Image: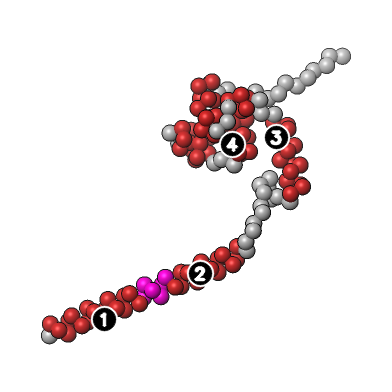
Amino acid sequence: MEHRTKTPSKHLGRKIMQMRELLGIRQEAVAEKLGVSQQAVSKIEQNENVDDAMLERVAKAMGVSAEAIKDLNEKATVYNIVHNSSISGSVSGQNYNCNFNPFDKWAEAIEENKKLYEALLESERKRIALLEKLLEERK
């Protein structure tokens, strides 16, 4: 009986994506640092093989070493995400520790908008009164 050990995945694009997601970096941010489009970063992440020069550039853009990306263990990453999310009560693998009530913030924003609208109306009323006064003086 032959015993086979599965070698770790060498899909560098997928490892780049996982490292980026672990770091909480969006494709757009990496693209901006590389001076390319978000679609170009997406294509890099879809490629199984990424040349060393590009890997170095992407790693630098994310603030990690190329070796960290190459050595990223996919199974350990998935285990950590699943394990940590079940412990911390996160949603969709992302920590959701909101320390404010979103509805309160929404209500505050509406009140602020009302104040701004009232100030704008008052400014327009003064402007109209001034224009009416100027018209009366010309008559």
Residue 59 in sight in this render:
yes
Res. 77 mark: 3
Q: Secondary structure at mark 3?
A: helix
Alpha carbons under labels 2 and 1: distance apart: 29 Å
* Front position in the image: 5 or 56: 56
> Dot 4: what SS?
helix
* Residue positioned 55% across, 69% down in the render: 107
Residue 72 percent coordinates (x, y) = 66, 28
Q: Is residue 67 magenta?
A: no
Which residue is rendered at x = 58% and y = 22% of the image? 49
Label 3, label 1: how many angstroms apart (C-alpha)? 67 Å
Instruction: Estimate the spatial distance between the alpha carbons at disc 3 and disc 2, rounded to whole Å.
Output: 42 Å
Q: Which mark is residue 20?
A: 4
Mark positioned earlier in the residue sequence (3 or 2): 3
Along the viewing direction, whichever of 5 and 95 lies nearer the viewer? 95
The residue indicated by pointer 2 is: 110
Compared with 124, 87 (above or below) is above
Q: Which residue is mark 1?
A: 129
Which of the 4 quarters of the picture holds residue 131?
A: bottom left
